[in-house]
Amino acid sequence: MSSALANGALSGGLIGLAAAGFTALWRLTGVLNLAQGALMVLGAYATWVVAAALDAPAGLLAALLIGALIGYVLQRGLLNLLLGHPGYLALAGTFSVGLALDSLATLLFANDYRVVPSAITSTVITIGPLHLLAAGLVAFCCATLGTGALAYLLSQTHFGLALRAASIDRDAGRLTGLPVPALFGVAAALSAAAATFAGGLLSLTGPFTATDGNQLLVLIAAAAMIGGAGRLWRAFAAGVVLGGIQATVGYLAPAALADAAAIVILLVALAPRALEARTASDGASGLGGLS
Amino acid sequence: MSGFLNSTLTALFLYIVVAQSWNLIGGMAGYASFGQVAFYGVGGYAVALLMLDASLSFWVALPLAAVVAGAYGLLLGLPLLRLRGEYFAVATLVAAAATQALASWQPAFTSQGAGLTITTVGTRQTTPYLGAGGFTLLFAGLALLSVCLVAALTHTRLGYALRVVRDDERLARAVGVRAGATKLTAFALSAALAGLAGGASAFRLVTVTPGQMFDPTITVLTIAMVVLGGAGTVLGPVVGAIVLTALTTAVDAVLPASRDLVLALVILAAVVFVPRGIGRGGQRVRLPAYLRGPRPPQHTTLLR
C-alpha cells in the first residue's frame, strides 16, 4: 500500500505541474483555462507520435512547443477578447476549446489506450519497503524542474516582473509601454506548455486515451483551487497529495471511488475559501503576486 | 409526423428545458453553474431506479425524480452557493464529476457503470414505451412548463430578489432580501427542472449509463444556448435552443463524426461574437478590453 501511495504521489506531480501552469494563468489573467486537461492529453499524443519517429526527449520537446503555440493563439485569439466580460464566458470558451481538442484527438487517434514504449517504462526501483516505477520517478523529477522553471520565469525575471505589472493594471501597463496582449499571450503559452509537457511525461509513464481530458481537468482544477490563485508550489504540492490519495483509495477500493475521494477532498478544502471568496470577489482582482 | 421531425422536435424541447434550468441559476441569479448535468443525471437515474426497483409508473417516477434532483440541488447548493464567480463554477464542475464517479461506482445503482435498462416490454414493464410522437408531446409539455416557470418567476418577489442578488449581493442583503435562501431556492428549482429533463430522457433512451447521463458537454451546450439567446431573459434560452438544435441537426446530417468539434466551434463563436445574446445584438467591432478605455464600474458604489 505504501508503494501505491508513493507511485500515486509521483504521478500526482504531473497533475501538479499542469496545475501550477493553470493557477499562474488564473492569477495573471483571471481566467481558469478549462482546456488544461485536454492540453495534457494533446501533449501526450504529441510525445507519443514524435517518440515513435525519433526518441522520447524529442517527443517532450515537441509537446512543449505545441503547447506554447496553442496557448499563445488561445490567449490572443480568444481570451484577450473576453477580458472584462463575465467570467463564465471565458470558462465556456476554454471548455469548448478542450472539447474541440478532445474530439480532434478522438478523430485522429481513435479511443484506445496508448503508451510510449521505452526502456525504463517497466523498471522498478526498490528503496526500503517502497517499489517505485523508475519512469514515474524520472517524470516526477522533470515535473518538479518544470514547475521550478515556471516559478523562476514568473517571479525572478524581468519578463515576469513586466507580466505581473501588466496583470495588476492593464491600462497602466499599456501607458508605460508594456505590450500587454503579447505578454498575456506568452503567459498563456507558458501555462499551456506546462500542461502539454506534463502530458508528455504522462505518456512516458503509463497508458492514456483521448477521453482522459475531463478527468485530468478535474484533478488539475482541484489542485489549483486547493493551492490558491498564483500559488504555483502549493498547487504542485496539492497535485502530489491528490495523486497519492487517489492511488491509495484506488488500491483499497474500486477505481471510481478513488476519483470521488479526490474530488470530495477538494470540496472540503474549498470550505474555508467559501468565506474568503465572498469578500475577495468584491475587492481588487488580485495583485499579481506569485509564489 | 415523420421520425426525423419527431426526433428534431424532441431535441429542441429537451434543450429548452435544460436551457431554462440553467437560466434560472446562471442567468437570473448570476451564479454560472458548470455542474448542471449532475441534476440531469440524477433525474435520469432516479426515473430508471424508481421504475426498475420500485416498479413505479413513469408518471409517478418523473415528478419524484424532479423532487430528488431538487433535493440534491439543495444539498449541493448549501455549501457551493457560498462560493462566488470562478470558485462556484469550478466547484460545481467538480461536484458533477464526483456525482458521475459515484454513479459509476455504486454497484446497486448502476451495475458498476455498465448502465441500467428500463423495462419497456413484457409483463414487468410499468409504463408502456411512449413512442416517438408520445415523447415529442411529453418534452413539449416540459418545455412549456419550464418557459412558464421562468416567465412567472420574472415578475414575482423571488424573481426581483434574484436579479438584485445577481447585480449586487450586498445591496440585496441591505434592502432585506434573504440572499442565501433566494439563491438556494433558485438552485433547487433549476436542479428540479434539469432533473425532469434527465428523467424524461432516461425513459426515452431506455438504457442509461453514467458517461451519457453525466456528460459535461451537456452543461456547456446548455450555457452556450443561454448565452446565445440572452441570459436572464424568458425567451432568450428558447431562441438559443432553436439555433443550436438547427445547427446540431445539420451537423449530424453532414458530418456526424465531428459533431463535438463543430459544437465547440459554435460555442466559441457565440462567446466571442454575441456575449450578450442575439436579442441584444452582437458588437460589430469587438475591441479587446485594454483598447476600449476604462471599464465602467462593476459594482454600485452605494455601499462603499
Image (tube, helix red, strand yellow):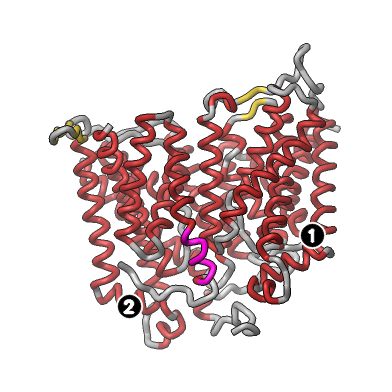
Task: Specify the label residue A162 is tagged with.
Answer: 2
Say whether residue A170 is magenta: no
**Helix, strand or loop for disc 1:** loop
Task: Write down the chain letter for disc 1.
Answer: B
Is residue B22 rendered to the left or right of residue A239?
Answer: right
Q: Which region of the structure is painted magenta?
A: A272-279
User: What distance separates the C-alpha of mark 2 from that of mark 1?
Assistant: 45 Å
Residue A260: % across, % down? 47, 39
Residue A237: % across, % down? 30, 53
Q: Is residue A205 above or below residue B159?
A: above
Residue identifier under label 1: B234
In depth, the one of A60 and B87 nearer the eye is B87
Query: Which image quarter is the N terminus of chain A in?
Result: top left
Q: Name the residue rendered at 56%, 51% in the picture.
A: B92
User: Which of the 4 image quarters holds residue B259?
Assistant: top right
Residue at the top extreme, as displayed: B123
Q: How many labels does the image show?
A: 2
Say whether mark 1 and mark 2 are on the same chain: no
